[in-house]
Amino acid sequence: MPYQAKTDWNYNDPVTEHDINRWEKGIEDAHISIEQLSVDVSNLRIRMTTLESILPENFLYNKFDDDLSTVNSIRVIRGYYNEAASRLEV
């Protein structure tokens, strides 16, 4: 059951066992969510590190441009045309 916040407290409202149990349940649920999110973030960190480790060294930062003016012929095996940037990316 999701946490139900009571946002209409008045100065002299009594605090009941129901209120305290509701708070405690909300705190418990938040801690469970944080634990699961921590596991998810850790798993994603491992996956990202693994993916980065299989790329050629500095591949992510090794950007180069060539106008191909000195090339007589070329055969593209893989790539796509990036229409937004008006360029072929291979």
Image (tube, rainbow, N blue to C red):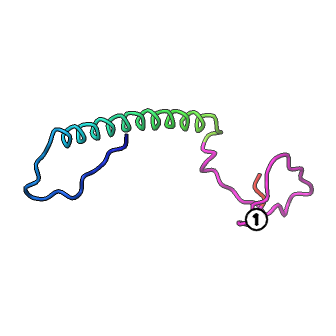
At x 7% / y 55%, what residue is drawn? 12
Work out whether 18 lies above or below 76: above
Where residue 15 sits: x, y (%)? 12, 46
Q: Is residue 53 magenta?
A: no
* Residue at which label 1 appears: 83
> Looking at this view, is 10 or 85 the one in front?
10
User: What secondary structure characterizes most of the magenta part?
Assistant: loop
> Looking at this view, is 26 or 35 the one in front?
26
Where residue 43 sits: x, y (%)? 50, 33
At x 57% / y 33%, what residue is drawn? 50
At x 29% / y 41%, what residue is drawn? 26
Circle 1: residue type? Glu
Tag 1 secondary structure: loop
Task: Please tell me in which quadrant of the rendered image residue 56 appears.
Answer: top right
At x 37% / y 43%, what residue is drawn? 2
Q: Which residues are magenta?
A: 58-87
Work out whether 78 lies above or below 84: above
**Classed neighbour count for the residue bearing mark 1: other residues with Cα under 10 Å, few (<14), some (14–19), many (≥20):** few
